[in-house]
């Protein structure tokens, strides 16, 4: 198997004054070379915590357990220095609000050059030429001018292009995009999504696209993982997930998307449980339309349903007694 | 139908931008001759990208901002020229729901207190207040125990319900909702949209629904106005506008909207470039630098909104048809 990233049993805990809270719980995922994996979920489901865990960018009060194998290397045991040489070079990340992730007092050129100086150590002139090339690659026409400009002079879409240029500066094998288009208007969103698709093809990198928008998933992803309250609840290829969703939560999400035809929207009752206050048993049980007795008692395990999808739901578990023994009870 | 409940004619709003006291003041045309009307019980959707003036329009209608020019008629009364006290009285019948439920509720006040404020402002007798409070909080799907709690104890969806209750408590005729669901997750968004629709039926409310999200507007609105740089460029009933968009900008907006269909075979029109700055808009048609069907005339002449069979569009591509029809 040619997997860029293999994550098994990833658990992220934060220690707080009130005790520890688990934000990512026993997560398994893999990303194949050249593939785009979408991670979907509502706010508070742990999708951003997952991406930050993969890059090991979390605060000191976070503890990570499990395994993250990236290009065959175990990321969790790397030293901070080794991690530094990995970040930005082999795995890169772009964030939701590009204004907050660019330094307002440095020029665009300087900020992109920084990545190249850190990882490649070329001559100044070579680096400048490379930065100008990168700006052209991400579709900025006045590269020379933008090179000397400051972030506040650019529009949201342009800033996101700059972030992408910075992320792909060292041809990473994995790009993690955390809600890259949420702050942008639809016409600009279309431009940025097209750009990410094009670059992925050109340099053959894999992408993890984190989003709350199933429309974006349909547009760019090959495979999707749906998260709820820190756990993966369904993974499938994009077609099966959108055409034939299994988990009641995924079904609900798809039906809540506004459409013209529906007179009334389907809505999922209640709201996402907080990290401190997760139900025993299945975490979605309090909001589920098809809840059964067993759902309140035990959390179902994540297991394959057919060749296209896997899901964490008692509705799709035949042998309940067997699973009950081997199931991992979420904390 | 009779006369519209809200009628806006030729509305203009300028913002003065001054850079240094020696320089000539510079004006931004946030709204440029807006004509729009809403009938009772209808929902008017206003869509556009950020910076197109849709929120400014909402605020001008409520006179939270003072327009420079133009008429705003609400229930037949011209409110554009009213003084502060008169406007205050009119606002009893027109209320607003804001985008961010985290920032528009005072964190130091209990929900009960927040909801009582409009009643005090509009001199509702003390003895009626409690009954109104309890009734309204239950209408928006919460319970009266919540009245003694503070905003931070609630989730985003519940806070937006409180925001709606605050707008509803005076039983207004018109509610201007400025991006009421943009800050919410999809599953919560659908709860709020359903609530808004139920309330509309129950109280025969009229909505002006401002949003950047085309799917939401397509779901909730009866008529839709598309704005671009301070102008309405297309206005029609929802079915017409989404079924057969005329303006190249509307076409691009619709095609750029990602939809959850893996077999989607729409031709995607990707616009080049960004929305130009409203302080320095292009000459002629404001959309022409990004338009794929631009002609020579678009660079020099601003197209006017012209109507044909209830579908208005401001684009030179259709001006000739309108001229032929009228002659």
Image: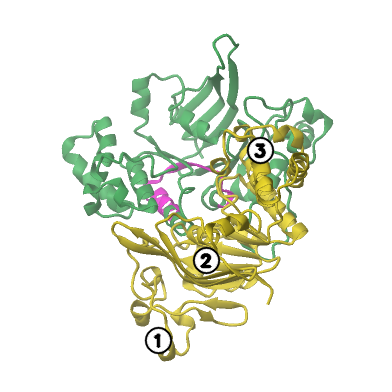
Magenta highlight range: B193-215
Using a 10 Å C-alpha cutoff, classify the residue at mark 2 as few (fewer than 14 neighbours), some (14 to 19) or many (20 or more): some
Q: Residue at x 56, y 72 (%)?
A: A235
Viewer-nearest of discs 3 and 1: 3
Q: How many marks?
A: 3
Check residue B307 for magenta coloring.
no
Image spot of residue B6 (x, y percent): 48, 33
On what subunit does the disc labeled 3 rest?
A
A141 to the left or right of A312: right
Say what secondary structure mark 1 lies in: helix
Residue B160: mark in rendering = none
CB within 8 Å, label 3 to label 1:
no
Q: Mark 2 and mark 1: span between their CA atoms?
A: 31 Å
Q: Which residue is mark 2?
A: A76
Q: Nearer the viewer, residue B326 or A308?
A: A308
B297 to the left or right of A208: right
Q: Which residue is mark 1?
A: A324
Q: Mark 2 and mark 3: span between their CA atoms?
A: 31 Å
Q: Nearer the viewer, residue A49 or B222?
A: A49
Instruction: Tell which circle, 2 or 1, labels the residue nearer the N-terminal end.
Output: 2
The reply to the same-chain question for discs 3 and 1 is: yes
Say what secondary structure mark 3 lies in: helix
Q: Nearer the viewer, residue B171 or A248?
A: A248
Question: Could you say which chain is coloured yellow in the image?
Answer: A
Check residue B202 for magenta coloring.
yes
Say what secondary structure mark 2 lies in: loop
On what subunit does the disc labeled 2 rest?
A
Q: Is residue A151 above or below residue A325?
A: above
Q: Which residue is mark 3?
A: A110
């Amino acid at each position: 198997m040619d997997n860029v990233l293999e994550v098994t049993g990833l658990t992220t805990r934060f220690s707080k004054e009130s005790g520890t809270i688990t934000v990512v719980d026993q997560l398994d995922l893999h990303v194949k070379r050249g593939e785009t994996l979408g991670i979907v979920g509502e706010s508070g489901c742990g999708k951003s915590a997952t991406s930050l865990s993969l890059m090991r960018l979390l605060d000191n009060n976070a503890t990570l357990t499990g395994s993250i194998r990236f290009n065959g290397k175990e990321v969790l045991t790397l030293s901070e220095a080794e991690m530094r040489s990995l970040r930005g070079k082999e795995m890169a990340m772009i964030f939701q609000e590009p204004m907050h992730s660019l330094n307002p007092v440095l020029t665009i050129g300087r900020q992109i050059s920084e990545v190249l100086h850190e990882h490649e150590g070329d001559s100044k002139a070579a680096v400048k030429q490379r930065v100008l090339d990168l700006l052209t690659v991400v579709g900025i026409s006045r590269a020379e001018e933008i090179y000397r400009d400051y972030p506040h002079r650019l529009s949201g879409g342009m800033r996101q292009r700059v972030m992408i240029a910075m992320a792909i500066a060292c041809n990473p094998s994995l790009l993690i995009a955390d809600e890259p288009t949420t702050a942008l208007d639809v016409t600009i969103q279309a431009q940025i999504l097209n750009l990410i698709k094009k670059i992925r093809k050109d340099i053959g990198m894999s992408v993890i696209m984190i989003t709350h928008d199933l429309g974006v998933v349909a547009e760019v992803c090959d495979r999707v993982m749906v998260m709820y309250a820190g756990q993966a609840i369904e993974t499938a290829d994009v077609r099966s997930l959108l055409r034939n969703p299994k988990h009641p939560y995924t079904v609900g999400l798809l039906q809540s998307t506004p459409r013209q035809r529906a007179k009334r929207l389907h809505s999922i009752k209640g709201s996402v449980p907080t990290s401190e206050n997760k139900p025993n048993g299945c975490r979605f049980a309090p909001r589920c339309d098809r809840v059964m007795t067993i759902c309140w008692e035990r959390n179902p395990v994540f297991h394959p349903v057919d060749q296209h999808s896997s899901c964490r739901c008692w509705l799709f578990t035949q042998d309940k007694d067997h699973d009950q023994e081997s199931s991992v009870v979420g904390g | 139908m009779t006369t519209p409940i809200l009628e806006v004619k030729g509305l203009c709003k300028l913002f003065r931008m001054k850079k240094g006291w020696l320089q000539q003041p510079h004006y931004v045309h946030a709204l440029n001759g807006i004509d729009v009307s809403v009938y009772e019980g209808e929902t008017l959707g206003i869509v556009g990208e950020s910076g197109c003036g849709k929120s400014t329009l909402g605020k001008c209608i409520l006179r939270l901002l003072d327009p420079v020019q133009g008429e705003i008629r609400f229930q037949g009364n011209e409110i554009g020229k009213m003084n502060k006290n008169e406007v205050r009285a009119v606002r009893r019948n027109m209320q607003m729901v804001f985008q961010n439920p985290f920032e528009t509720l005072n964190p130091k006040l209990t929900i009960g207190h927040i909801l009582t404020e409009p009643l005090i402002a509009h001199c509702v007798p003390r003895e009626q207040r409690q009954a109104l409070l309890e009734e309204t909080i239950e209408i928006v799907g919460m319970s009266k125990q919540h009245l003694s709690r503070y905003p931070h104890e609630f989730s985003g969806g519940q806070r937006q319900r409180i925001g709606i209750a605050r707008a509803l408590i005076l039983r207004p005729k018109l509610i201007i909702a400025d991006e009421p669901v943009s800050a919410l997750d999809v599953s919560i968004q659908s709860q709020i949209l359903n609530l808004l629709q139920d309330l509309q039926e129950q109280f025969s409310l009229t909505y002006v629904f401002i949003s950047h999200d085309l799917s939401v507007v397509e779901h909730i609105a009866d008529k839709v106005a598309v704005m671009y740089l301070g102008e309405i460029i297309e206005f029609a009933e929802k079915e017409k506008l989404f079924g057969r968009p005329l303006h190249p900008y509307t076409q691009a907006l619709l095609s750029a909207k990602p939809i959850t269909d893996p077999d989607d075979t729409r031709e995607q029109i990707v616009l080049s470039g960004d929305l130009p700055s409203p302080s320095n808009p292009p000459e002629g048609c404001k959309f022409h630098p990004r338009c794929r069907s631009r002609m020579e005339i678009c660079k020099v002449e601003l197209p006017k909104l012209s109507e044909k069979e209830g579908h208005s569009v401001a684009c030179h591509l259709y001006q000739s048809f309108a001229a032929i029809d009228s002659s």
